[in-house]
Image (tube, helix red, strand yellow):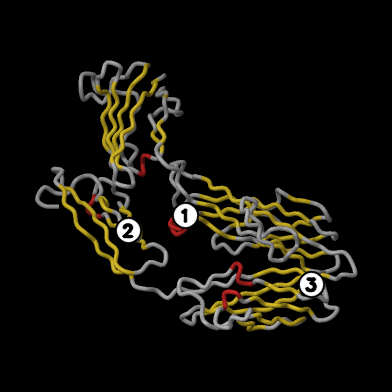
Amino acid sequence: FGGDGPSDTPISVVLNPENGTATVNQNGTPEDPTDDTIEYTPATDFFGTDEFTYQICDADGDCDTAIVTIDIQNQDDQPMAVDDLVALDEDTTTTIEVLINDSFGGDGPSDTPISVVLNPENGTATVNQNGTPEDPTDDTIEYTPTTDFFGTDEFTYQICDADGDCDTAIVTINVTTTNGLTGNLNLIKEGVYLDVNKDCIIGPGDVIEYKFIVENNGELDIENIMIEDPLPGLEIYGDPINLEAGEKDEFSFTAKYIITESDVLAKQVINQAKALGVDTTGNIICDLSDDPSNLENIDPDEDGDPEDPTIVVLKDQEGIIIYESFSPNGDGTNDEFVIKRLKKYPKNHLQIFNRWGVKVFDKDQYEQNGVERFKGFSDGRVTIERGKYLPVGTYYYMLNYIDETGNSQISSGQVYLVR
């Protein structure tokens, strides 16, 4: 920082990387840049060279920039096979599109078919290569239960990528008897994002709350219904329930998930729950959850109820919000002039004038940590005494800030002060 010493503002990224994100970590000391670091995260599946430019300033306001060059090494991507659930009548054959919810990853598929690595106990599972033995992406598996068998069966299949990395998944099959009534569940899962700290910025520590609707739309009563969800860190609340045929439950099960840094970078959280119960004939009844806002309406078990993963999009709203009035009367409500989402833009300058054009407030880095908001007092920089209560009336603000693209933005208008 030179002989003048460091400034009392953080270092900054002045030119963002093209293939990732670079974020300044102030380490809890926004007025001391000497312990600042920069966290870099490459874009998903990117490897190669990336760079960004950062700036430091001294106590006199002199600044200098430097370029950070990052060499991202190619990593071995992994395929992902996801469990499936299928329903069919006894003494029938079904074709299962097991790859519909799987991924071969960034390395792409192998040139060999998918395979059944653990056969079902009560039937046969055969891979159909669809005439393309070197292209597994169109492979399906045909399952036929043993004659007269009904109940629950399962088998395990495997997919591999071009590097030879493999993953397995389990297919659960509900084989229902055609000689009697059947049980069926329909599970709906909805997620709602909650801005815990009310800063209008999506970040780690914010929460997604999930609501589950369970319906018994079969012909048999179902008991001991539970909800399972593989999302790490998700907490499910609710005890097992019983549902008569045709009965629906909307209040017994909820879940809470705390958003992580990786979720913010991915800009979404995707997961799928499962409802499990036992009908009055002893059959295990299972249903994967559906997101009612997802219009793809995938129905892998062909029970007439869609089963789409629930997707909660994590995208910050655009722009800032400037409230047109505030009431600094000491009641603890609306006592300060608030500009929502300005915290995202630390390079800003706010000026406030009275109706005669006299400046009554002047502040850099407004809405940043440690910077005091306008509370209806003059800051004493011109003709009005510092700390003096300003009278009720209309004031005029001018805000200059640098947005996320590095462009300068100006916002101006009026704010009404009441007491």
**Above-or-below relation of 27 to 78:** above
Which residue is identified by label 3?
175
Query: Could you tell me which quadrant the C terminus lies in?
Result: top left
Q: Residue 216 location, x and y as percent?
A: 78, 56
Q: What amino acid is labelled 1 in the image?
A: Lys
Residue at figure coordinates x 24%, y 61% from the top left: 68
Residue 354 in the image: state x and y as whole percent. 30, 19
Of the image marks 1 and 3, the number of the one nearer the N terminus: 3
Sort mark 2 into few (<14), some (14-19) or many (20+) by Cα contacts within 10 Å.
few
Could you tell me how far apart the alpha carbons at marks 1 and 2 are, in whole angstroms? 17 Å
Label disc, if present, on residue 18 of the rendered structure: 2
Whole-number angstrom distance, CA of label 3 to CA of label 2: 52 Å
Few, some or many C-alpha atoms within 10 Å of disc 1 (few <14, some 14-19, many ≥20)?
Answer: some
**Three-letter code, disc 2:** Glu
Q: Which residue is mark 1?
A: 267
Image location of residue 256, percent across then percent down = 58, 53
Q: Is residue 282 left or right of residue 17?
A: right
- x and y, in percent, of residue 313 in the image: 52, 52
In-front residue for pair 124/286: 124
Look at the numbered disc 2 and give the secondary structure of its residue.
loop
Residue 284, quarter of picture: bottom right
